[in-house]
Amino acid sequence: MEEKTIEQGFTPDGYIRDQDCFHTLRYRTMPADINGCGWIAAYNLRRFLGQEADWRQVMAELDGMHRLRVPGPTLMVVMREYLQRHVPGVRETVGREEALAAAQKSRAGIFRYREKFEPHFVSYIRTEDGFFRFFNVDDGLEDSKMSMERFGAEHLRGGTVIVFTVD
């Protein structure tokens, strides 16, 4: 099987779609294909908002915000601080039904939930036809369009669900 390249990790319009393509980079002392979903989601949200954010800088800043140099995912306290710093007006909603309702009304956001029992951050943006475009959900769903209801039914199946939204 051919090894994925960083360039393959991007959509034609510049969003990051596949964290597997970032296996050569390190984030929180680990290969970024294992735990890079947080910085990827933050980059995608900032891109949607038209901010001049370089993905390398987003990754480095989020990595540097963790106090301990230990392996792990992006911590919620760090994601909150990062989004408050860079995304004015971001709102946090906790709870599966509450998060889905908030996301349904939003222009874009980031979900924090468990995908196949693993903590995961996923960014999404509203499309012109009323559906949502999700990035880096899972293999085969790297750049997928679906209703918020379908996303909830197929992916928000257990554990705490949190969404950061932009109106």
Image (tube, helix red, strand yellow):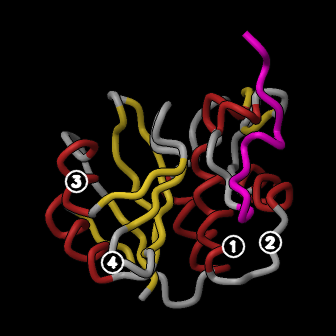
Residue 135 % position (x, y): 53, 53
Mark 2–mark 1 contact, CB under 8 Å?
Answer: yes
Q: Magenta segment range? A: 1-14
Residue at disc 4, secondary structure: loop
Q: Is residue 53 left or right of residue 78?
A: right
Residue 117 % position (x, y): 33, 28
CA gap, disc 4 to disc 3? 13 Å
Based on the picture, tell me whether residue 67 belongs to the magenta stretch. no
Q: Residue furthest left?
A: 97
Q: Which kind of residue does numbered mark 2 sit on? A: Ala
Residue 18 % position (x, y): 63, 40
For label 2, the residue is 53
Pick the front one: 108 or 84: 108
CA gap, disc 3 to disc 2? 30 Å
Q: Residues within 10 Å of mark 1 (few under 14, many from 20)?
A: some
Q: Which kind of residue does numbered mark 4 sit on? A: Gly
N-term-proximal mark, 1 vs 3: 1
Q: Main secondary structure of the magenta part?
A: loop
Based on the picture, tell me whether residue 11 belongs to the magenta stretch. yes
Residue at disc 3, secondary structure: helix
Residue 166 % position (x, y): 46, 82
Q: Which kind of residue does numbered mark 1 sit on? A: Arg
For label 4, the residue is 130
